[in-house]
Image (spheres, grey):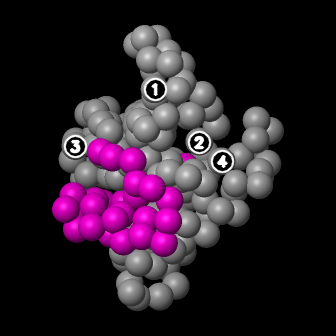
Amino acid sequence: MTEFRRGVRLGVDVGKARVGVARCDPDGMLAVPVETVPRSEHSLTRLAELAQEYEPLEFVVGLPVNMQGADTPSTADARDFAAALQQRTGVTVRLVDERLSTVSAHAALRSSGRTQRNSRSIVDQVAAVVLLQHAIDTEKSTGRPTGSVIPTTEEPV
C-alpha cells in the first residue's frame, strides 16, 4: 500500500430528488451506506449534522460527467451543491468523476434480487458507496487523492 491519508470520508451522490451518503472507516478499508437525504432546503443541514457526527477528513462528492468527460446538465448542480456543502461545513470537498456509479449501483442491486422500483430508496446510498470506494481504492493504489478540491473561499456558516 502506498501513502494513504488516514481518516473517515463521507461520499455524497447528489441527485435532483435525493442525496445518497456513504462513509468509510479511518483506514479506508470499506465504504458503507449511511442514509438517503431528501433533496430540499434542509439537505445541507443534514449533511452538516453527519459531518459533526463522523468528523470526516473530507467529503467526496460525485461529479456527473458524460462518457467523454464533458459536463452534463447535472454537473453545475453538483458543483454548486458541493461548494455550498464546503461553505456550510468547513470540511474539504473533493469532486470525483462519478461516471457509471449509479449504473453500477443499479446492477449491484439487481444482482442481489432487488427491482429498480423497490431499490429507489437506497440506490443513491449504493451509488455513494461505489463512488467512495473507488476514491479510496484509487488513493491507496496511487498514493494520490482522486478528483479535485473545491477552493475554500469563506468561513463556514
The residue indicated by pointer 1 is 118
Determine whether the residue tagged by mark 1 lies in a helix, strand or loop: helix
Q: Nearer the viewer, residue 88 or 46?
A: 46
Task: Name the amino acid, label 4.
Answer: Pro
Q: Is residue 138 visible?
A: no
Q: Earlier in the sequence, mark 2 or mark 4?
A: 4
How far apart marks 2 and 4 lie (CA) works out to: 6 Å
| Residue type (three-letter) at the residue carrying disc 3 | Asp
Which residue is situated farthest in the front direction here?
117
The dot on residue 64 is 4
* Region rendered in magenta: 34-62
Which mark sits nearer the N-terminus, 4 or 1? 4
Percent x, y for residue 116? 54, 24
| Tag 2: amino acid | Glu
Mark 3 and mark 2 in contact? Answer it, CB < 8 Å.
no
> In the rendered image of this protein, does residue 43 appear above or below residue 129?
below
Circle 2 residue? 98
Structural crowding at the residue carrying mark 4, measured as other residues with C-alpha within 10 Å and reported as few (<14), some (14–19) or many (≥20): many
